[in-house]
Amino acid sequence: MGIYDRDYHRADFEQHMPHPHMQLRFPHPTPMVKYLLIINVSVFLVCIIIKPLGALIYEWFSVDATSIGRSLQLWRLIGYQFLHDPSDPWHIILNMLGLYFLGPTLERFWHSKKFLFFYLACGTAGGVFYLLIANLGMVPVGVLVGASGAILGMLAACAILFPQFVILFLFFPVPIRIAAVVLTFLYIVKIFTGAANAGGDVAHLAGMAAGAGYVYLWPRWKSRRVTVKHADDWEEKFRKYSELQKEVDRILEKVNRQGISSLTRKEKKILAQATKLEQTKSRL
């Protein structure tokens, strides 16, 4: 079972603007987008030219819901994203166009590592959700290949982050958010009507949901993590300050009993550190 019926877009955007606009020129691929394009096309050509090797690659790296054992082989959730239906060239052409036109903007916005994580996470979400729905008997059990989950995750992310984008959808210029809503509706209808590629459409929706969820939830999670880290840092500083105070009290008691000449070099250093800290607090 492949992933078909994709509608992708032509858009290019200013490299350094925080809210890019569509341009009438082809985008310059960013480093990670370039690598992903090369890997996808290379794997596709190798699988066509060397058919026995291609059959082996599809056997071991496609998402396979035909058995529980294969469903649990986690490497497939990454590998299937670089495989495309060899009998349908449009499968890879449309996916790579989506990557080429949408990917550079997100990579420039997030930088390469975060973009790659996002891309693979959206594709992985599509594979996981397909396995879940297929094993529950809600769509036909089969094999899933293609980068559509990742590509549609990018579409959802761009629709949220850059709502002013205008893309080519069915050969017509359409605001990206309208295209995202229309595609979501179409995929839902196709799933519930039992269309031929219902399993692929499940992966499409999951990729879009993962893309939207990442954009909405990541900043909140990151903000919470920073808050927790600051709280932990404050607790650590308070603990060290308390320990310093106890040590200072011990040293002062020793001075009172034996005189300042009895202090070791380390104890004198601690006392100087405490004095400096108190002077700093006084200035504040």
Image: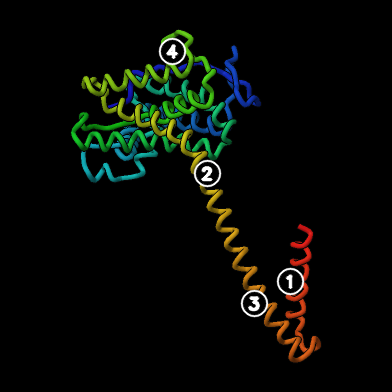
Residue that appears at 54% across and 29% down: 106
Pick the residue in front: 101 or 274: 274
Quarter of the image with the N terminus is top left
Q: Residue 169 has which mark?
A: 4
What is the count of numbered marks? Answer: 4
Q: Residue 274 has which mark?
A: 1
Asked which secondary structure carries label 3, the reply is helix
Asked which secondary structure carries label 2, the reply is helix
Q: Earlier in the sequence, mark 3 or mark 1?
A: 3
| Relative vertical location of residue 71 with respect to residue 141 in this rendering, above or below | below
| Disc 4 residue crowd, few under 14, some 14–19, many 20+, Cα 10 Å | some
| Disc 1 residue crowd, few under 14, some 14–19, many 20+, Cα 10 Å | some
Query: What amino acid is at disc 1?
Result: Ala
Q: Residue 246 has which mark?
A: 3
Residue that appears at 77% across and 89% down: 262
Q: Earlier in the sequence, mark 2 or mark 4?
A: 4
